[in-house]
Amino acid sequence: MNLVIYLYRKDGVFMIEVKRRKGETFDALLRRFQRRMQASGKILQAKKVRFHGKDPSRNKRRESALRREDMRKNYEYMFKTGQLKEETHRKGPSKR
């Protein structure tokens, strides 16, 4: 039986290939494949970018900033006019 393990990315780029040697068990083949994966660093790279999303566009960032500014102004107005309780008032905008 001729067994080959391939690993492909979504875009079809070939990454790792391990061919079964004569008389080699499947467990040994799998172990060799896992060692090649560890050595290549592909697992670490995949874990690093796993939850990384695309950066929002310039328009979305601008809209978000304008929305935050409007909410901040509305909050300050409500506090000044007495529509907000004293203990819920924050001490100015937080700067990060």
Image (cartoon, grey):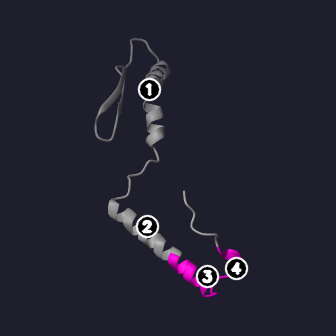
Question: Image quadrant of residue 8?
Answer: top left
Q: Secondary structure at mark 4?
A: helix
Which circle marks residue 79 in the picture?
Answer: 3
Residue 63 at x, y = what percent?
A: 38, 69
Q: How far apart are the alpha carbons under marks 4 and 3?
A: 8 Å
Residue at point 60% right, 88% down? 81
Q: CA distance from mark 1 to mark 3?
A: 58 Å
Q: Which of pointers 1 and 3 lies earlier in the amino acid sequence?
A: 1
- Kind of residue sitting beneath label 2: Ala
The vertical placement of 88 against 58, above or below, is below
Mark identifier at residue 65: 2
What's under tag 4, amino acid-wise?
Glu
Q: Which mark is residue 92?
A: none
Instruction: Tell me the element at label 3.
Output: helix
Give the Cα separation between the discs numbered 3 and 2.
21 Å
Is residue 72 toward the left or the right of residue 49 in the image? right
Under circle 1, the secondary element is: helix
Mark 2, Cα crowd under 10 Å, few <14 / some 14-19 / many 20+, is few
Q: Which residues are magenta?
A: 73-89
The residue beneath circle 4 is: 86
